[in-house]
Image (spheres, rainbow, N blue to C red):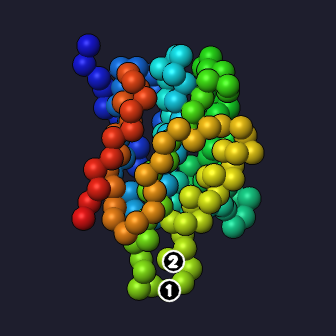
Amino acid sequence: MSSQIYEVGMSEYKIAENPVILVSSGVGSCLIIALYDRTRKIGAMAHAMLPQAADLQAAKETPARFVEQIIPILIEEMEDVGCKKENIIAKLAGGANMFATLGIYSREIGVKNIQKAHEMLEHLNIEIDAENTGGNNGRHVEFNLANGVLSIISKI
C-alpha cells in the first residue's frame, strides 16, 4: 500500500493515520512537533514559528503558530480520534539559529521554541522519544505514520 503525502506548512498542523507521510520543508528556527500513538499508528505534526503568543487573539487565530498553544491541541485532537495519552510520544526537529546577524532576540527564537516544547511536554507527561534540534542549518522533515520514524534532511 502506498502512502499519501500531506504537506504541513508554517503555522499549520495535521493529524492523520497510516498510510500517510507528513512532510514539512523550510524548517529553520521554527519547531516541528511530531506526536505519535504507536498502538493506533496515528500521528500529528505542527510547524510552530514562535514559543508563545503575545496576545490571546493571535493564539486563537493561528494556534499552530505557537508551541505553547498547539501542543495541547494536538493531544486533545489525537484523543478525539481514539488515541490514549499514555501511548503518545513526541519527536522534535528544528529550532536552528538561522538569523544570527539580526540581533540577540532573533538568535534565541529557535532555543526558546525548543525550551517551550520541553516545558509543555513535561507538564503534559509526554515523553520526548527523539530530537534533532538546534544548530545553524535548515531542515526538511518527513514523518512516516507506518512506523513513527521522523526522517530529517539537513540543509547546509
Quadrant of res 134: bottom left
* Quarter occupied by the N terminus: top left
The x, y position of residue 138, in whole percent, is 34, 61
In the image, residue 38 sits, relative to residue 49, either above or below, namely above
Q: Secondary structure at mark 1?
A: loop
Of the pair 5 and 103, the residue shown nearer to us: 103
Instruction: Residue at 71% x, 37% y: name it.
Output: 125
Q: Are marks 1 and 2 in contact (CB under 8 Å)?
A: yes
In the image, residue 2 sits, relative to residue 141, either above or below, namely above
Quadrant of res 96: bottom left
Name the amino acid, label 2.
Ser
Residue count near mark 1 (Cα–Cα under 10 Å), binned few <14, some 14–19, many ≥20: few
* Quarter occupied by the C terminus: bottom left
Residue count near mark 2 (Cα–Cα under 10 Å), binned few <14, some 14–19, many ≥20: some
Instruction: Residue at 54% x, 84% y: name it.
Output: 104
Name the amino acid, label 1.
Gly
Q: Secondary structure at mark 2?
A: helix
Instruction: Write down the residue under mark 1.
Output: 103
In this image, 21 relative to 16: left or right?
left
In the image, residue 42 sits, relative to residue 102, either above or below, namely above
Residue 63 shows in the view: no
Q: CA distance from mark 1 to mark 2?
A: 6 Å
The x, y position of residue 18, in whole percent, is 40, 20
In the image, residue 109 sits, relative to residue 71, either above or below, namely below
Instruction: Write down the residue under mark 2.
Output: 106
The x, y position of residue 50, in whole percent, is 57, 62
Residue 53 shows in the view: yes
The x, y position of residue 33, in whole percent, is 52, 45
Instruction: Residue at 66% x, 44% y: name it.
Output: 121
In this image, 6 relative to 30: left or right?
left
Numbered tag placed on residue 128 in the rendering: none
Instruction: Residue at 42% x, 80% y: name it.
Output: 100
